[in-house]
Image (cartoon, rainbow, N blue to C red):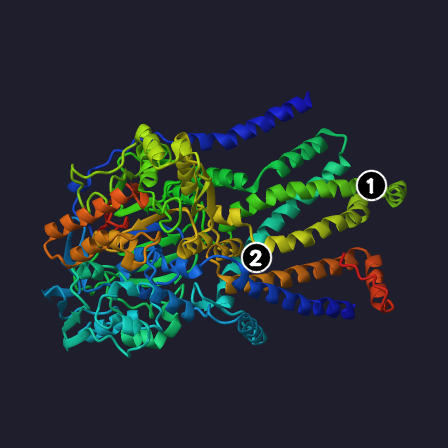
Amino acid sequence: MSKFVFRRLGLLIPIFLGISLVASLLFYIVPGDIVRVMLGQHVDPLTYANVRRALGLDISFWQNFLGFMHSIIRGDLGYSYIQQRPVTQIILEALPVTVKLTVVSLCITVIVGIPAGIIAAVRDRQFSGRLINFTAVAGISLPSFLLALFLQLIFGISLGWLPVSGPGRGLLSYILPGLAIGLPLAAFYAKVARASMQEVLTREYIVFALSRGLPFSRVIINHGLRNALVPVLTQMGMDFGMFMTGAVLTETIFNLPGMGRLVYSSINVRDFPVLRGILLLFALVVVLANLLVDLIYTKLDPRMAAAIVREETDVAGQTYFKDK
Amino acid sequence: MRSKRLYLLAFLCFIILVLPVVGCGPAKVVSEQTAAERLPESGGLIRYSLLDDPASLDPANFSEELAINVGKEVFDGLVDFDYKNNRIAPALAEKWTVKDNRVFTFYLHKGAKFHNGKEVTAEDFKYSFDRLLNPKTAAKVAWILENVKGATDRMSGKAKDTSGIKVIDKYTLEITLERPYTGFLSRLTHPGAAVVDRVTVEKAGPAFSSTGAKPEVLIGTGPFKLLGWTPKNVIKIVRNEEYFGRRAYLDEVDFKIIPDETTTLNEFRAGNLDIIDRIPPGQNAVVEKEFTGQTLSGTIWGIEFYGFNMGKEPFKSNVKLRQALNFAIDREGIIKAVLEGSGVPAKGILPPGMAESSDNFRGYTYDPAKATALLAEAGYPKGQGLPEIEMSYNNRETNQKIAEAVQAQWKEIGFRTKLKPLPLPEFKREVGSGNFSIFRLGWVADYPEPDSLLYPLFSSEAGNFFGYANQEVDRLLDEAQRTTGDKDRLAVYRQAEQKIIDDAPAIMMFHPAVKYIKGKNVSGVETNFDGSVSFDKIWVSR
């Protein structure tokens, strides 16, 4: 098992190299004149040249790339020329905001979405099941930003229960944005969980468990849920990476200075050093999240662990290595 | 039966959730005492929103509105601009003398102190000004001092210091210019020409210029000092009790970073902001109604225009074509429809306030018949023979709408265009490289002097954007820069302006406006020529 983990982590090296190369190319291939943007309306040639030199925009691609490799080895992601401070510092300011928002949204998604999906599957023919199914369809069609604006108007301005925007009030600040992201996603997860559960319910072991006289709720939770969760978890692993890239619209509406806003503003001002750092971080997150999901699989379904072991012992040349 | 009841319940829930939203609409009646009835009170806090963090609060980087908004409260220069009386006012320089319009001697306010307690001396100014020109600083506002003797040598790294800046004694500073220039004092009112403390700046290194710089690093002399700066969140400044001039009324000003206009307005509605200046597009009327008596607006000393590429056909040698396109635009209609009335149609280039327009000034009015006739005279009857021409602009929502309106109005006379919206960096590159046909640009006066609009945009010596060159205009602008009497100088500028307008290298659209909404207890809010407000004049009543 540890070999598997190491091999997955080893994958990070070529990924990092590739991303660094492409991200460093950005400096040279993306059109646009960032010096002019920084100078504002008043541009004279001497100032233009001085600023360009001061920002290190006159160095060659290889100098740029190798310099970055060198700083990465020292655990440093470079220096933002717009903000005039280390990229690591900038990312470390935005990351906690996004992590908190991700955790709150995921909690809402899991707490609302999965039970709703299970109930919808179990009570498929009843009114409550249909209502959940209908609400889920409606929820999926509801854009996050619209929900965000409604939530802000109702709970922030009219009722005044929760902060309108801004990260200043601890966990309270994350409830509305968490709902705005979490609820439409919960609707989606409810659909996934429902479909998965419905399929599981037709399996023989469920019928067998029921015929053994076990209580219905126990059969659903112990026998059904465990198996029904596998597709849900796969989805979640993929979404997690997406979550960490931040939700630009929601972060903007609720004024949360997270990764989404950082990416957006860095693209706007062409702050390539920051973008390069973020790209590396995202690669790390996606690889780790998928690894984590794989490890959880083995807990949910021991056959998966066997598959991993088999994969490790495969003869070289026969690549059964499938990244999920 | 049961399901029917459930539907009813769901519907009721929906009504309960949505009603409060409807209830919070406009139509609030505001009864407000007028500001004049109140006397300034000391104390209190103002929360104001900024679109984003300034990239830096180092005066050398005061090339953007965001930085100036905050920076002008923390830093001071030699002189200031008194917008109300339209004159240069003393700041850290108590008084000054001018010899031959070329040698400026400044006598500093004795006892004025930096936020760290050190006294401000002429040496500090020499250092600060030389720092702006030092190529290693790469100051974005080095242009402020470009006329100082030896500035070019200093900026290109040929000289070790600036020969035109001399310390006479502890409190006297002498600045000599390369050649006589009346606008120099006006340039010095720019917040970038501020004094910084050498020891602090050199000790801090790059930390002085970085986003989120610390209060112990950002040392100025201004009416407020920095309390803290949390990037993407808030910048807090507090009153400087040791200020050499009139102390500010407010205890504290919080600049909250809120990128979204709608969120800003919602925060204001919820009582979490005291002054805002960004109204979401299309909300002007709603806001006026909702906050009657709480709004104020001002015209910015600037100009928005569409420039022609004067180095390329078909515009290069065809003044009639350029004039025809000028007559085809209904400026007032566009301001009304797109900007909700916020803006002043441009007759010439200089905005009202900077220079009152005279009756005999010839500008362009909306006259489609004349436009059609001129287009025919230009050799393109009904636009025949003209290719589809690209219009480049920065892809902001308002710019897009204005461009669409202009495109439609030009189409009426037969002039066909293709819209080319670009992200800001690409747009700047295109304009900088001169690789465009028609481009849209907004220009705000950097300093309160006609020179700040006319010279960089239309003098061929300044390397203007569109490759416009008229020797007579160059001569007049040059003459104006040397003319001392305010009235005489303005007359020369007016002459130059008329010549430019007749040449029509651009379509002057409008002078932009700014609108503020303030809390009911906020007084003393006055807009400056650049659209900013001075927080040291604001007070709150409790």
Q: Is residue B19 above or below residue B220?
A: above
Q: Is residue B195 visible?
A: yes
Circle 2: element type: helix
Which of A317 and A216 lies nearest the eye of the viewer? A317
Disc 2 to disc 1, C-alpha distance: 35 Å
Which of B542 and A67 lies nearest the eye of the viewer? A67
Q: Is residue B329 visible?
A: no
Circle 1: element type: helix
**What is the three-letter code of the residue carrying label 2?**
Val
Horizontally, residue B480 falls left or right of residue A44, namely: left
Quadrant hosting residue B451: bottom left
Q: Chain of mark 1?
A: A
Residue at which label 2 appears: A99
Locate the C terminus of chain A and report the quarter of the image it occupies: bottom right
**What is the three-letter code of the residue carrying label 1?**
Leu
Horizontally, residue A184 falls left or right of residue B369, namely: right
Q: Residue at x 26, y 56 (%)?
A: B251
Mark 1 crowd level (few <14, some 14–19, many ≥20, 10 Å Cα): many
Horizontally, residue A148 falls left or right of residue A82, namely: right
Label placed on residue A201:
1
Residue B227: % across, % down = 33, 63
Residue B274: % across, % down = 32, 46
